[in-house]
Amino acid sequence: MRFDIISVLPELLESPLNHSIMQRAKDRGLLEVFLHNLRDYALGKHRQVDDYQFGGGAGMVMRPEPLAACIEKLCAERIYDAIIYTSPDGQTLDQSLCNQLSMKENLLVICGHYKGIDERIRQKYVTLEISIGDYVLSGGELAAAVIVDAVGRLIPGVLNDETSALFDSFQDDLLAPPVYTRPAEWEGMKVPEVLLSGHEKNISEWRHEQSLERTRSRRPDLLERYEKGEDAA
């Protein structure tokens, strides 16, 4: 799987994508991430990539020409399954969307900055807009890193235990159950006996019950979606 990311500050993406699971994915040849500095396509001697808004107002807007030049160059080299713009008014990133994107081969991500990108770029090139939450970041780079991490870890072979991702929170619209490790007793608090029993069926049932209870108390909106899915099935 390949990600191409367009940014005015690509260095912001270097650290989160060059360590841990993402680095192992790249080392194994399962994931490729290429960063493209928009300033390589900047205009004039001042290397301009942004300008004032028409109609006035605070904040600069990323100009269409540098973005179009970069996008056109990349699209001439390969076909993208989606051209993504990280935007507060995009579709909220959730596990279902991550699962869908993990099945793709080539994804292009445009990181907004300043007040955003010229609307005409969105109209002409962007096929999917993604928000990682109802808040505003200084730029789209952190959102792009979240997308790459959330999607990349789902690629078969990336995680050492390929079944691990199947039991993550949100995979079935439920939060994950509590987890424990050694020691079996710590500061007077004991691991639930069922987890020490070795009885797989009882452990599975306990975990499902705990997932239901945790989702009911913390994210009832998810539980409603889960129950609708159960009824449909």
Image (cartoon, rainbow, N blue to C red):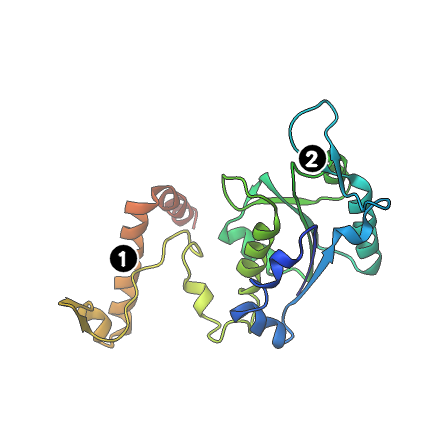
**Image position of 193 with respect to 7: above or below:** below
In the foreground, 79 or 223: 79
Q: Is residue 230 left or right of residue 117?
A: left
In the rendered image, residue 193, in percent from the top left (x then y), is placed at: 18, 70
Of helix, strand and loop, which one carries label 1?
helix
Of helix, strand and loop, which one carries label 2?
strand
Disc assigned to residue 182:
none
Residue tagged 1: 210
In the rendered image, residue 11, in percent from the top left (x then y), is placed at: 64, 58
In the rendered image, residue 71, in percent from the top left (x then y), is placed at: 79, 50
In the foreground, 15 or 190: 15
Amino acid under disc 2? Met
Q: Residue furthest right?
A: 44
Camera-near label (1 vs 2) is: 2
Amino acid under disc 1? Gln
In the rendered image, residue 22, in percent from the top left (x then y), is placed at: 56, 68
